[in-house]
Amino acid sequence: MVMRDINKSFPGVKALNHVNFQLDPGEIHAIVGENGAGKSTLVSTIMGLIQPDSGDIYIGDVKAVIDSPSKALSLGIGIVPQELNLVPQFTIAENIFLGSEICKAGVPWIDGKATQREAAKYLDKIGVKLDVNLKVGDLSVAYQQLVQIARALAFGAEILILDEPTACLTYHEAQILFKILDQLKEEGKSIVYISHHMEEIKQISSRVSVMRDGNLIATLKMSDTTIDEIINLMVGRAFTHQKKNRAAGPGGTCVLSVRHLTRQTEFREISFDLHEGQILGIAGLVGAGRTELVRAIFGETKPDGGEIYWYGSKVSVKSPKYAINLGIGYVSEERRKFGIFPISSIRENITMPLLSVLNRWTGIDQASEKSIAAQFIQSLKIKTSSAEKEIRLLSGGNQQKAILGRWLAKNVKVLILDEPTRGIDLNAKAEIHELIVKLADDGLAVIVISSELEEVINLSDQIMVMHQGAAKGFLNAQETTQEEILKVALG
Ligand SMILES: Nc1ncnc2c1ncn2[C@@H]1O[C@H](COP(=O)(O)OP(=O)(O)OP(=O)(O)O)[C@@H](O)[C@H]1O
Ligand SMILES: [Mg+2]
């Protein structure tokens, strides 16, 4: 596939500026770039989700007009979108053949047996052992992605596009995905792979294209380049990666104490103290109970044992509203589901949603709302043409920054961050880390859950490691290593 001189403008942004891109058969081609660089826009034009303003796309020697996702599919372009679009109530088999149902000879009804048989064939092809009669809604994100790949293959896809596929995968699941991608590559299929994780890109891709501000500025052979060179091209200057050392330990007043907190089947007997200025990391494998624990602390679920103390007084956190009133903020890992108000502006997303819940905010005037929003758009470097832009129109990483800004704007005492930098580019990530540390230095108490061990270590003072719902150990972030955390996390 060849893309020639592709241009695409949105109000206030040139998202693609004379982009030329070539995808060869049998290659895994990575696309990298900072948040808002134009990566998703580029692949959306291949997937038929967006029409370029000008430019041509050739598949083989033929000029293609890709005006819808089904057109893309018919041209052999399969997609594993970040927002998976399978039907949760349907089985794996039904999902794989959705839209091209296998019918019994001569009659218009679906041949269930044949569907199952064929579906199993495609799963088998990518080495996945799953019962095709399972409902897709019961599968983990990782397996849903694999079903999506099987579906693309069943439709005869020669080109596969993955936009940040590993954002919600564990290390192990990601390795399984890479093996499958490698195998597809060997079979001559072409794969476009968007990710912010440099190690992954180094590991799996043959070539990498770097985007910056709507321009595709270089396409390099992986074997001829280095991660440092790629990063420098991405950010447009030499990127210095300095690991900060947080000197301050817990010295301030104890804000939040948790004692023997238990919610059967989720987590058991969790106890810790959180002080002003402290950053407590929570590490563990997916399923260890980390998110469940903080949801209970935030009042989203009800624990069935144990206590929570707020500045020494026992409290019963009955609801998120109650938690917010105490001064607890929570950035959930599921941004799309719980985090954003998609058709509201960035300004409103930063300042408004909780205002109506919390009457104490009434009386805030538009002018101060605007200045609060402007302040966070600047300090978090949210890439947008205006604070009034609907948040859903921002790139994924920039949406995440806006959500973070909302809580930072709230003056909370305790901030709970669940996978705060998922989908955020390297540079922005370093800046967000800096900001969190600065807030902690000013007295904010922070709980941060992250599956990235490097992030937990860099950010926290102390790390609680969970395994199957229990706290298996507390480690000093200054002294511990990734290996040690992993060992405890594995039980
Ligand atoms: N539908 C849209 N309407 C208006 N602006 C848009 C729309 N889609 C994308 N943009 C803008 O185009 C630019 C490129 O966005 P894009 O989503 O392609 O970035 P990205 O490289 O995928 O970033 P990320 O790493 O954050 O996902 C951004 O400034 C974004 O706000
Ligand atoms: Mg994107």
Image (spheres, rainbow, N blue to C red):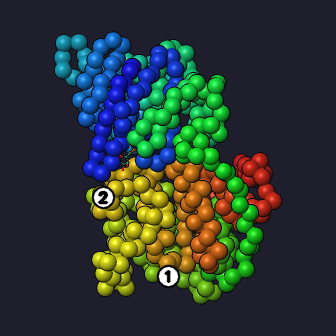
Query: What is the x, y in percent for residue 84?
Result: 39, 40
Residue under pointer 2: 389
Q: Residue at x 45, y 67 (%)?
A: 376
Q: Earlier in the sequence, mark 1 or mark 2?
A: 1
Could you say where residue 305 lies in the image, as x and y percent from the top left?
Answer: 59, 72
Report the side of 392 relative to 299 (left or right): left
Q: Quadrant of the N terminus?
A: top left
Query: How far from the left and from the top, in percent, is residue 265?
Result: 57, 58
Name the mark on residue 326.
1
Estimate how packed mark 2 is, as few (under 14), some (14 to 19) or many (20 or more) residues with alpha carbons within 10 Å: some
Q: Is residue 410 left or right of residue 455?
A: left
Q: Nearer the viewer, residue 285 or 329?
A: 329
* Label 2 beta carbon within 8 A of ligand 1: yes
Image x and y of residue 80, in percent: 42, 33
> Is 302 or 476 nearer to us in this picture?
476
Which element type, helix, strand or loop, lies under badge 1? helix
On screen, 30 above or below 168?
A: above
Most extreme residue toward the right, as rendered?
Answer: 479
Label 1, label 2: how far apart the Cα atoms are: 31 Å
Is disc 2 placed on a helix, strand or loop? loop
